[in-house]
Image (spheres, grey):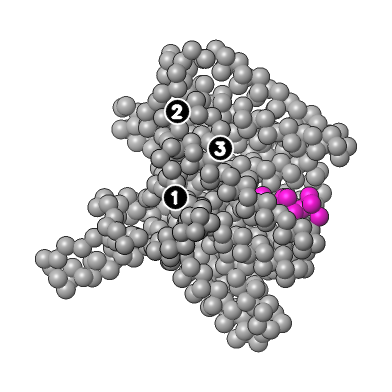
Amino acid sequence: MKYLAVIGKVLGILLGCTALVMVVPLGAAFVLGEGEMLRAFLLPLAAVLGISLLVIAVTRKYKITFTAADGFLIVFLAWVSICVMGAVPYSLSGHADSFGSALFESVSGFTTTGATVFPDVEKLPRSLLLWRAMTHWLGGMGIVVLSVALLPLLGSGGFRLLSAETPGPEKDRITPKITTTAKILWLLYVALTACNLLLLRLGGMDWFESTLHAFSTLATGGFSSRNESIAAFHSPYIEWVSGIFMLLAGLNFSLIYRLLKGKAGDLFRNSEARAYGLVILIAAGLITFSLLAEGGNAGGFEPCLRQAVFHTASILSTTGFSSGDYNLWPPLAGACLFFLMFIGGCSGSTAGGVKVIRHVVLCRQAGNEMKKLLYPRGVFSVQLNKKEGRKNMVYGVAAFVFLYFVMAAAAALLVSSAGFDLFSSVNAALISLGNIGLGLGGFGPGSTFAEVPGYVQWGLSFIMIAGRLELWTVLVFFSREYWRQ
């Protein structure tokens, strides 16, 4: 009974906090006169908040203490519950064809994937567009991280929840206290969002669209209020601003904090940050060269460079904005974007994907294996940030990458069962698992998941959550060892 009470109490807190956020789009619907949306937001807000308060009241005598294994279950249940709650406004408003489509849109928002089932987002009510962007922004830094930051009553369990939500190869605390670290990260997140918003406003966007796109950019989500995404604004300035902030959002937020504190050396000594910068330079350089070699049909060097940097940032950071149809680009440029889908952003960022740090670990281990061929008796270790990494880290990274490609293959088979060609199916799998939102082929710029059958949407919703929680938090439930505990 105590076990269930503690889980119920934590879930009640997390769901209650998220439900309160619906007050913002509800207020927007009231101010904008969108009467049909008042019910769509008010019903889930009242129901979830009421149930949460009741559960918290009933379990108030139970102290929140749980194991790491419990943390995995709580985080998974929290994400599923919050995504279901987030789907209700889409369903009640009548804009989603089915609850499966509504859930897909909600999961895509909270996991910052950015894939959509709406073929014409410009027809959606502005309050619903605001809710879409807010799901991005909340899911970007993490609902659990926000709760840990604002609710010290989670106590020592806060780090277990945070670890379960971000089970990457590196854990980086800015301060000894996890609640303080979470607050600093959220304040930095808010500050960067505000800067992006103001710069977009200076570029000609109105306040509403600046807010939506700033939310999507810092969350590396990709939801836009325009069918053509960033391309609809026809502004080189907006493309440069968005590209730069997408790259920042794909960088470890702890490093950005240290940079602002005057510790620039930490950024340049960081192995992952250096690799991240190198990937950007190589990809943007190759794409620029490819576009120019095609005859400079984009209008000269600056437009080619801008398109290259923007889309490199969009795919690498797993944001998914587009400023043009890159399906029409030369094969070399398209190949660069496709391979960026296998990389992702940095650990400790809002980006998805495999993460740069894992590629760094595998590349350095590959170098060590070659050294062993020359020096059989030598002992070599993976060096990260000029320090020796944990010996078992390579095994964890290799296992993750293996499972990542197994799940990508399974997702591709699921999509192909609906009649999509192999390339489009692989792209849909990478889009969902890497939380990228936009790929090539049949799921490139201007495309949606509206024509995807319902059973595929349900399956991809599960894949998106698994990708957002970096696989382990979800796949651990399929092991006998977990249930034996």
Q: Amino acid at mark 2?
A: Gly
User: In terms of sequence position, does the residue under pointer 2 or pointer 3 come before the other?
Assistant: 3
Question: For this rendering, which residue is in front, 395 or 198?
Answer: 198
Q: How packed is label 3: few (under 14 Cα within 10 Å), some, or many (20 or more)?
A: many
Q: Tell me the magenta residue range.
A: 206-215
Which of the 4 image quarters holds residue 28?
top right
Residue 467 vs 93, above or below: the answer is: below
Q: Describe the element under mark 1 as helix, strand or loop.
A: helix
Which of the 4 image quarters holds residue 48?
top right
Q: Amino acid at mark 1?
A: Met
Q: Which mark is residue 146?
A: 3
Q: Which residue occupies 62% across, 67% down? A: 310
Which of the 4 image quarters holds residue 111?
top right
Q: How packed is label 2: few (under 14 Cα within 10 Å), some, or many (20 or more)?
A: some
Question: For this rendering, which residue is in front, 404 or 169?
Answer: 169
Q: Which mark is residue 407?
A: 1
Q: Are marks 2 and 1 in contact (CB under 8 Å)?
A: no
- The residues tagged by marks 3 and 1 sit, at their Cα atoms, a distance apart of 29 Å
Residue 399 vs 33, above or below: the answer is: below
